[in-house]
Image (cartoon, helix red, strand yellow):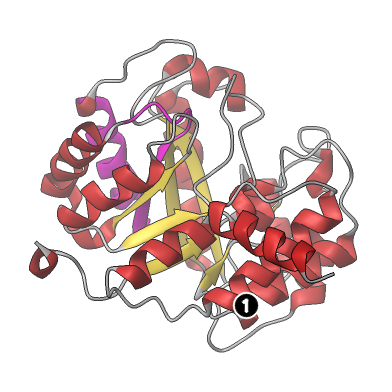
């Protein structure tokens, strides 16, 4: 079975953006900067740093420019930023971003609650963003939310996900991250979806992004690895949720993902000890234990020695 698995997986760390955006307490800018830098020092090749969204929508990320100025640039780490519109793109360009992410959902109702636009309206917006980003020399990554279920409409058609993924690639996205936003997916469903999307855009363009709401995230990742996926999103300390999805708890914890991958002999380039330390750092800053199982073990060991 291991012969079917990738020899290396690219881990895309989304904690500083997707993880912190749902926090009610304001996280100091200096803490966000230190978190991003700790994650980069741990060897994560991609760390999504922030989002250039309107502060009225997500006040937690109002300091996007300051975060970008604080983290600077590194030759071995990419710091993408999420942008919802042309105004966000313009801010990102001025802040020195080298890569952006755009987003839509495979659910009409979720899209309308999230960005006040239907699927095709959102795609028109994305095509405009991607075209301008390309002209500015920025790479573009695409997110599709609710690929295995929606909190408002329930089931989501595979054909809808495939069509959106194809449109994102046609718009210029080099990679499409398939997001199980409410954590309702199970391994067979996840693998079948990946195989369907791969027929349209190719496996090398697919990333997966699981929430662990029902404890299925690692199993879903394993099923997708068997299907040939080699890029996985995760969030340090299991941070996150979605402000527009009822009951959507945290993302798959990066520590747990890396522990599993290393235990399977799959390389990531990530220093697990340094990653766990970064998770404890942000958990301490938030005043709560890490949602990561590996992080929780480290926290207990730390407590036993103090």
Residue 42, quarter of picture: bottom right
Q: Quadrant of the N terminus?
A: bottom left
Work out whether residue 296 or residue 239 is closer to the camera in this orientation and state it.
Answer: 296
Q: Decide if residue 54 is on the left or right side of residue 199.
A: right
Write down the residue under mark 1.
274
Q: Is residue 292 above or below residue 272?
A: above
As drawn, the residue found furthest toward the front would be: 304
Q: Which residue corresponds to the image point at 43% horizontal and 81% vertical from the top-left?
A: 269
User: What percent of the width, then of the height, locates residue 256?
Assistant: 48, 57
Question: Could you say where residue 45 lies in the image, as x and y percent from the top left?
Answer: 49, 76
The stretch drawn in magenta includes residue 179 = yes
Q: Nearer the viewer, residue 172 or 165?
A: 165
Viewer-closest of 116 and 193 = 193
Find numbered disc 1 in the image and state the secondary structure of the residue it sits on. Answer: helix
List x then y, in percent, for residue 28. Answer: 90, 57
Q: Quadrant of the C terminus?
A: bottom right
Camera sees residue 129: yes
Q: Mark 1 Cα within 10 Å, few/some/many (few <14, many 20+)?
A: some
Q: Which residues are magenta?
A: 159-185
Residue 149: image location, x then y, percent? 37, 22
The residue positioned 79% from the left and 46% from the top of the image is 288
């Amino acid at each position: 079975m291991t012969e079917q698995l990738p020899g290396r997986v690219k881990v895309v760390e989304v904690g500083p953006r997707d993880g912190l955006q749902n926090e009610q307490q304001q996280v100091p800018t200096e803490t966000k900067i230190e978190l991003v830098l700790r994650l980069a020092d741990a060897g994560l090749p991609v760390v999504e740093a922030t989002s250039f969204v309107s502060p009225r929508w997500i006040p937690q990320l109002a300091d996007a420019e300051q975060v970008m100025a604080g983290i600077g640039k590194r030759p071995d780490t990419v710091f993408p930023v999420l942008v919802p519109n042309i105004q966000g793109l313009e801010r990102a360009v001025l802040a020195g971003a080298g890569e952006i992410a755009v987003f839509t959902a495979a659910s009409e109702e979720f899209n309308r609650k999230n960005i006040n636009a239907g699927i095709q309206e959102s795609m028109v917006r994305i095509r405009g963003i991607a075209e301008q980003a390309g002209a500015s020399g920025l790479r573009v990554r695409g997110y599709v939310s609710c690929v295995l279920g929606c909190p408002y409409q329930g089931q989501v058609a595979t054909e809808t996900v495939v069509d959106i993924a194809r449109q994102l690639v046609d718009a210029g996205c080099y990679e499409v991250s398939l997001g199980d936003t409410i954590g309702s997916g199970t391994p067979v469903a996840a693998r079948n979806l990946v195989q369907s999307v791969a027929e349209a855009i190719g496996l090398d363009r697919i990333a997966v992004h699981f929430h662990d709401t029902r404890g299925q995230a690692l199993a879903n990742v394993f099923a997708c690895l068997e299907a040939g996926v080699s890029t996985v999103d995760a969030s340090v300390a299991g941070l996150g949720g979605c402000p527009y999805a009822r009951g959507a708890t945290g993302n798959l914890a990066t520590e747990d993902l890396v522990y599993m991958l290393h235990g399977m002999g799959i390389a990531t380039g990530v220093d697990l000890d340094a990653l766990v330390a970064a998770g404890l750092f942000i958990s301490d800053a938030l005043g709560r234990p890490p949602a990561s199982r590996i992080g929780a073990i480290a926290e207990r060991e730390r407590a036993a020695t103090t």
